[in-house]
Amino acid sequence: MCGITGFWTTKAGSDLAETAREMAWAIRNRGPDDCGEWTDTAAGIALAHRRLSILDLSPHGHQPMLSPSGRYVMVFNGEVYNYEELRKDLPRQAWKGHSDTEVMLAAFEQWGIEGSLRRFIGMFAFALWDREERNLCLVRDRLGIKPLYYGWLNGAFFFGSELKALRAHPRFEPKIDRGALALLMRHNYIPHPYSIYEGVKKLPPGTLLKVDSPKQESQPAAFWSAREIAEQGSRNPVALDPQAATDQLEELLRDAVRLRMLADVPLGAFLSGGIDSSTVVALMQSMSARPIRTFSIGFEESGYNEAPYAAAVARHLGTDHTELYPSPADAQAVIPQLPYFYDEPFSDSSQVPTYLVSRLARQSVTVALSGDGGDELFAGYPRYALAAKTASSLKLIPRFARNGARRALRFFSAETWNQLFQRMAPIIPKKLLARRPGEQMDRLASLLEADSDQIYLSILSHWDPPSELVLGAVEHPTALTDPHRQASLRDPISRMMYLDLVSYLPDDILTKVDRASMAVSLEARVPILDHRIVEFAWKLPMSLRVRNGQEKWLLRQVLYKFVPPPLIERPKMGFGIPIGVWLRDSLRSWAEELLDPIRLSQEGFFDPVLVRRAWNEHVSGARNWQYHLWDVLMFQAWFTQSHSRDGIRSYAASQ
C-alpha cells in the first residue's frame, strides 16, 4: 500500500525531481517507509512514490521500478496477491527481490498491459511510463479499491493517489466544480468520474487511461466491466442447488482470504460482529495456527454500539480481540483532522469510527482485512426491499388516482401545509409536526409518479434537489441518473445492487476505508471484493441472495459453518455516531462558525437561508437535519483547511 503521483509537461525544467518529491511528500502518510522519484527531463515526465512496505521489505521493493528490459517505469499502489503464481508462468530470469511490483513489470513485457491485467488478482492503481512509445498509462483496479485522480491543467498532465499531491504542484490552479458539490450534497460523496475540482477526474474502476501527450486529452477504456458482469450473470444464472452454491462460495472466499493473508508484516482484521466481517475473520482463523488479531470500536450510546456483538464472535472463534470505547471527546477530536485525511470533501459520518478502528489496529498490525462488499453483492441493504415494495405498492393504485392524489398534495405549498398542520397541533402527534409535514407531502407527491429506480434515488438522496442549495450548480449525470450508464437488468433489486456496486461502493465505502486506513499508514484489504467472487455472485439467482425475507442468505450459510446463528442474527445497525446529538451540544460552536450566514454569503457556495433554516430547526429539535448539515459542514471544513482565507475571498470575488 503506497501513494503515487507525478506529472508530464512540455515545459520541463531542472526542478522535475524536486517538484515530484514535494508532491509525494504531501501524501507521505500513505507511505512512511521509503520514497523515490524518476524523471526524464527530455520528455518532461516525473514519477514519484511513497512506500508502505508490506511485501519484500528490502530495498529491492523500492519504487519507481524499471522493468527487466528497462522499457517500462512504474509507480504502484496496492497489491497483486497472486504474484507468486504469476512468477511461475513467466520466463525464468534472475529476480532481484520477491515483490509483486517486479512481477507485474515482467508480466507487462511478456503479456502486454491488458493481457497482464486480466491475470491480476488484487487491488491496484498505477502509472506506467513506456520509454519506447513515450506514453503514460494509468490503471485502476476492477472495483475501485484504490484511488487515482488525474487531469489536464495549464498545459500539463497531473495524477496522484490524493488531491493534495496535485495541489503541491506550483502550476496546479484548482477551481471548485459546483456540479460536483451538488452531488456531494445529494449523496455525501462525489461519484466518479468527477472530483471537487474542475478539470480533475477520478479514474473509473476497471479502466485504463492511455495518455499520448500532456496537452491532448484522452478517455479511459474498460478492461473489466461491472455492467457486463451484471448483465451476463443475470441472463445466465448458475444452476446450483443451495448446498453446491454454498460450497462454491466458501471455496472462493477461502482462496480470496488466503491470498490476502500473505504479508511480511503483522496482520489482523476489523470485526464488527456482522455477517461480512465475521465471515472473513472466521475463514482467517480457520487457516491460522495462532489467534488472529481482531479489532472493534464501541460507543456508550446503545444505538451505535456493535462492540458486544463483535466480542461475542471473537470469543467463539478464539481470536486475539481488542476493542476500544472512545469517549465523545476522543471521537470529536478526530473531526478537525477529517478534511486533511479525506482530502476531498466527504461526509459519510461513519468516517469517524472507521478512522478510530484503523488507528486502533495500526498500534498492533500493518495490514487489516475488512468485510466490505457483502451488502452490494448479496443484497444486504434493507433499502432494496423497501424501494421495491414501495414501487410495487404504487403500481396497485390506478394511474388516475395517483395523478389526482399528486395534484391534491401539491395544491398547497410545503410551507402552507406546515402552517395548516400547526393549526391542528392539538390533535396532531408532536412527532409528525417535528418532521415538517409540508416537505413530506411534497416528497410523497414525487413518489406517486416515480418508478423503482427513482424511488431508490430518492431514498439515497440527502438534499433533494441539491441545485436549490448549491448556488449556480447544474448537477452532473451519474450512474444513478444517466440511462447510458445503467445496466439492462429486469429485477429492481438487481438494478439497485448494480448501482451501489458502481457508485456507492467505490465512491463512499471504499473511499472511506482507504482514506481512514491510509491516514495511519495501515493497509486495508477487502477479500469479499475479489473479482472472482463478484463474478460468481452476479450469476446467483436472487433466491440464493434473499430467501424468506432474509438478506445475504447464501453468505450466511457459509458463516453458519463457523458461527451459530444466534451470535450474528440481529437487525442491521450500520457504523455510525450520534452526530445529531453532538451538533446540538459539544459541536455546536464549531458548526455555528462554519455555518455563519455572513460567511456563507461571502463564500457564495450555499444558499444561506436554506442552511440556516435547517440549522435552526435541528438545534431547536424541531427536525433532525444531522446528515444534511454534515454534508455542508464537511465541505466547509475542507474548504477552510484546503484554501487560505485570502483564497476564499479571491475565489468568491471571481464568481
Image (cartoon, rainbow, N blue to C red):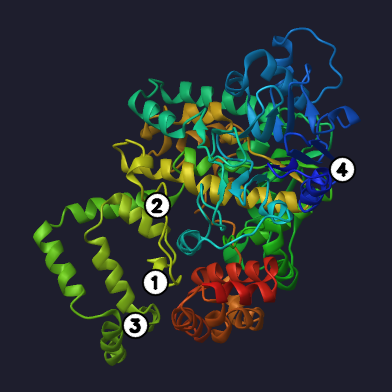
Can see residue 524? yes
Dot 1: within a 10 Å radius of its alpha carbon, few (fewer than 14), some, or many (20 or more) residues? Answer: some
Distance CA(mark 2)–CA(mark 4): 40 Å
Disc 3 versus disc 1: nearer the observer: 1
Distance CA(mark 3)–CA(mark 2): 40 Å
Quadrant that contains the N terminus: top right
- For the residue pair 438 and 190, the one nearer the viewer reads as 190
Disc 2 versus disc 4: nearer the observer: 2
Q: Position of residue 54 (x, y in %)?
A: 81, 35
**In the displayed structure, does residue 197 sit left or right of residue 230?**
right
Disc 4 versus disc 1: nearer the observer: 1
Helix, strand, or loop for circle 3? loop
Can you tell which mark lies on residue 429? 3
Q: In the rendered structure, are the residues bearing label 4 and label 1 in contact, judged by CB atoms less than 8 Å apart? A: no
Q: Which residue is mark 1?
A: 468
Q: Which residue is mark 2?
A: 477
Disc 3 marks a residue whose amino acid type is Pro
Q: Position of residue 465 (x, y in %)?
A: 37, 66
Disc 4 marks a residue whose amino acid type is Asp
Disc 2 marks a residue whose amino acid type is Pro
Distance CA(mark 4)–CA(mark 1): 46 Å
Q: Which residue is mark 4?
A: 33
- For the residue pair 30 and 535, the one nearer the viewer reads as 30
Disc 1 marks a residue whose amino acid type is Glu
Distance CA(mark 3)–CA(mark 4): 60 Å
Nearer-N-terminus badge (2/4): 4
Nearer-N-terminus badge (1/2): 1
Q: Position of residue 64 (x, y in %)?
A: 79, 33
